[in-house]
Image (tube, rainbow, N blue to C red):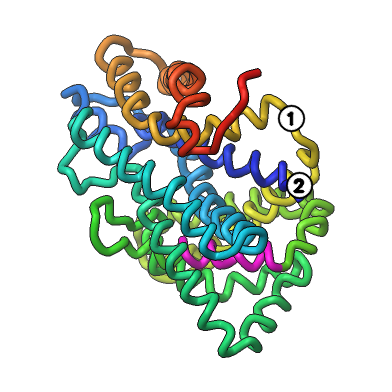
Amino acid sequence: MRYHGLDGLRAFAMLMGVVLHASMFYVEGIGTELGYELTGRILIPTSETLGLIFTFIHVWRMPLFLLLAGFFARLIVQRRGTANLLRNRFVRIVIPLVGGMLVYNLIFQFGGINKLHHLWFLYDLVWMYILVICMKYVSRIWPSITIKIDWIFGSPARLLWLVIPLVPATIIGRPMFFNVIHDELGPSGPFFILGFTYFLIGWFLHRNSQVLPMLASKWKLYFPLGIVSFCVYMIALILVFEGGRDAGLIWAFGMVIASVTTLLLIMGFIGGSQALFQKSNIWIRYFVDASYWIYLLHLVVVFAVGAAILRNTFLDPIIAVLVNIVVTTFICTATYHVLVRYTPIGWVLHGRRKHL
């Protein structure tokens, strides 16, 4: 069975990296420092709208991607075995990771040779695949644990029990609501704990894939609930950063509501993608293939375009971000089609593709 909806959703999460990083230039607390480093310009405008968009994408994007990574990892194990998963992920993950680091650090000179940049999640994924394979064999000793976890995936409502492990994992991985990562070779950052929790959720979601049609039938409930929860989350986030007498209590509440928000939005996204995209579509299939290359390349393009806009224009932040997204997406897609899709690079990223 081909999960066309989840394939498209994984590509969507990848492509949202362009929106996220293009918006960074104008997010308060991030944009000023980033813009100054790239252009020397001191007065960088900010946008509350872009800050809201940035935060919304950030809440669910990486957890969703890692959940889908766990889902498709078990799919490969079930169909082709553990050894094939390791071979496949060496080609699809390790080679792009090493190649991307060499290009960014040696050719573009973005940093030292050990810098991971936005490829840190690929580095984390390598360890997640190794760890889940080890856990797979260890779980045979205690099969009752697996059965108890399977119960949680018996219905969408039961999935909400996942908030219990997600709250402490969120406190570790996002103590101030944003990912705590290490972008250099070495030990992974605290976000690894939260990321691996979602990876395992994806693994068990595939093991209990009968819940997917249930999510598809109720996505119009869970996604709006996720939006409402996100609004509450934003209020908590603002109150925490403003400080005050009850900031500690509000922070604790924020950790809980952050976990609920992420889970509800992911349930909505998964259900919606399964409900709306059950059949293959040639354009969606194309961008499913292209999304990995776009993500690998986009950071240097986004930064170059964003810096050029800041140096040479005084565009409204929202217009500037839209221009950056369009130009970056065009450049990355064009280079993908010409240099990647039918070449050995494309064979590494997604396998061989026939010319249309």
Q: Amino acid at mark 1?
A: Asn
Element at label 2: helix
Tell whether 291 sits left or right of 317: right
Question: Closer to the camera, 77 or 244?
Answer: 77
Tell me the kind of residue under disc 2.
Gln
Residue 275 figure quarter: top right
- Residue lying at 38% horizontally and 68% vertically, measured from the top left: 172
Residue range (magenta): 195-207
**Secondary structure beneath label 1:** loop
Visible residue check, residue 202: no
For residue 281, which numbered disc appears in the image? Answer: 1
Vertical comparison of 108 with 4: above or below: above
The C terminus is located in which quarter?
A: top right
- Is 351 covered by the magenta stretch? no
Taking the spot 31% from the left edge, 61% from the top edge, the residue there is 189
Disc 1 versus disc 2: distance between alpha carbons? 14 Å
Q: Residues within 10 Å of mark 2 (few under 14, many from 20)?
A: many
Question: Closer to the N terminus: mark 1 or mark 2?
Answer: 2
> What secondary structure is the stretch in magenta mostly built from?
helix
Say whether residue 15 is visible.
Answer: yes
Q: Which residue is mark 2?
A: 274
Position above or below: 32 against 156: above
